[in-house]
Image (tube, coloured by chain):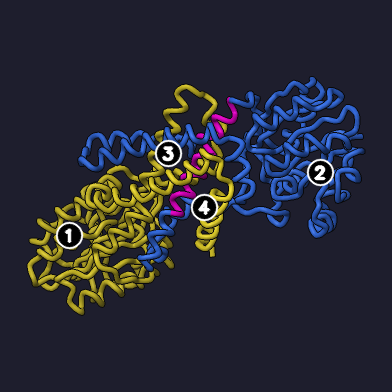
Chain colours: A blue, B yellow
Amino acid sequence: MTTIAIVGLGLMGASLAKAVRPHYDHIIGVTRHEETGRKAVARGIVDVAAMNYEMGLPAADIVVLAAPVRIIISQLQTAHHYFKDGAVITDLGSTKREIVAAMNALPNQFGAVGSHPMCGKEISGIDAADEALYRNKTWVICPTLRTTPAAHEAITQLAQNAGANTLEVDAARHDAIAAMVSHLPYSVAAALTSAADGFSQSEPLTWNVAASGFRDTTRVAAGDVTMMLDILLTNADKTLAAIRDFQFNLDQFAAMLERKDEPGLRAFMDMAARTRRELNK
Amino acid sequence: MTTIAIVGLGLMGASLAKAVRPHYDHIIGVTRHEETGRKAVARGIVDVAAMNYEMGLPAADIVVLAAPVRIIISQLQTAHHYFKDGAVITDLGSTKREIVAAMNALPNQFGAVGSHPMCGKEISGIDAADEALYRNKTWVICPTLRTTPAAHEAITQLAQNAGANTLEVDAARHDAIAAMVSHLPYSVAAALTSAADGFSQSEPLTWNVAASGFRDTTRVAAGDVTMMLDILLTNADKTLAAIRDFQFNLDQFAAMLERKDEPGLRAFMDMAARTRRELNK
């Protein structure tokens, strides 16, 4: 009999609970929000909801921390007093170096593996929970000093039960890649929205003209700010490196546009179009 | 009896033909590509296809130029020899100053109005034609020196027949807004794709980790390069101004991240999230 506790029933935690419920004997949701706990049980997302670690964690064989990154780190430092001996811990945080460091510092009666499933939505909360969220998505697994074979197996199985495909990457490498393909796109989307917002102050027709291209390019800027702030602050060095890399590319592009270098622009744009179209395949 | 000729049967031209066909007596498609002309007639997109201006334009009361911007400009300079006296001309180009200038230079027996329907897809060609493309979208109308009341009425009616809502804006103002909400997002998407492509040369797992956030932010970089190149080269000044504006915002964001200015970042991100969420309403 395997009992799993999911700490945090926002979009990611509640979607995971829905996706894996058929695979475990008992799913405990842990949330400080009474309203969320009531909904989670009423909707059959979890079997039972507990309002704090003391009441929710001692029975769990697997504990999934599904909160903003800096909260996960503090949970690893404090909530472990309530973990059952031999429990396997993972998380769903989007940056991994600081989380893996906190997992490394866990008492050695626990198993621990960092997780980052590459999925999400720009809406948050239990009402957006979707059992298909993880399906066919990449679930990055980061080994820690507490990654016993049993812990590795339990979390690999959890990811597969959610319908995801695991990819093992160490934390530093994960954070550099995530900075480029996720934290940089967020930063760019936020800066683009901010630039257009400033422009719209003196041009009232701005939003009448903005169409699907603008909406798609900026979609991620509508995401959960608290979650994103934790991500950026725990991956600032790699995100800044990615921003500099991007700025270099945009500067090159702008310089070619400035001197109307048509062959140069076409080569740059053709390469970008080919690369981007590959992702649709 | 009103006959309309659409010059260019790519995504925009063929979609317009499909959308408005019930509203006109006769729709002529003009395309140099025999295969496209055959398809357009076989699929009922147009009544008849002509392979050049001489054969297609003399019967048309309304001529819609649906090509990349610099081709539209050259069509206005040369194809007008084949326009019927009193014909009303419009175009579907994404920048308007140079096109309106070319319309202003038309012989004064023609009526002319610049058009820019704010819609599109990242795929091109007649096979992507979609009669719903224009529905409920904004169709910008730019007045020219050749905008007679009859021309204004004919093109307003054309837009409405396609299901779009017209918005009258002069060409310079249009180009500044379009630079901010469309040509800048494209430039950013292309530079982001280019940065990630460079990064992936030394990190083979890059594309395994890239998820929907990266795909949405870069979607427009997959668009038609020839069309986009014409847009950028006929709106370079406004696009460069928008790029500088964006870079200023991104620099501010990066500086706050560098010094871990959490309240500053949160304010910036909150404002971007609020602005972006407004667009979903």
Going by the numbered disc 1, the residue's amino acid type is Gly
Going by the numbered disc 4, the residue's amino acid type is Phe
Give the image location of residue A144, x and y in percent: 72, 23
Dot 2 and dot 1 within a common chain: no
How far is disc 4 from disc 3 in space, using C-alphas?
Answer: 21 Å
The local secondary structure at tag 2 comes to: helix
Range covered by the magenta-colored residues = A173-194
Q: Residue at x 68, y 54 (%)?
A: A128
Which of disc 1 and disc 3 is earlier in sequence? 1
Measured along the vertical axis of the image, is residue A63 above or below residue B59? above
**Is B263 left or right of B117, judged from the image as shown?**
right
Circle 2 Cα neighbour tier, 10 Å, few/some/many (<14 / 14–19 / ≥20): some
B71, B256: nearer the viewer? B256
Q: Majority secondary structure of the magenta segment?
A: helix
Question: Depth-wise, is mark 3 or mark 1 nearer the camera?
Answer: 3
- Using the image, name the chain to which the residue with label 1 belongs: B
Residue where numbered disc 4 is placed: B268
Give the image location of residue B236, x and y in percent: 25, 49
Q: Residue at x 54, y 44 (%)?
A: B213
Measured along the vertical axis of the image, is residue A165 above or below residue B151? above
- Using the image, name the chain to which the residue with label 2 belongs: A
Question: Depth-wise, is mark 2 or mark 1 nearer the camera?
Answer: 2
Residue where numbered disc 2 is placed: A21
- Cβ atoms at labels 3 and 1 below 8 Å apart: no
The local secondary structure at tag 3 comes to: helix
Circle 1 Cα neighbour tier, 10 Å, few/some/many (<14 / 14–19 / ≥20): many
Give the image location of residue A64, x and y in percent: 78, 38
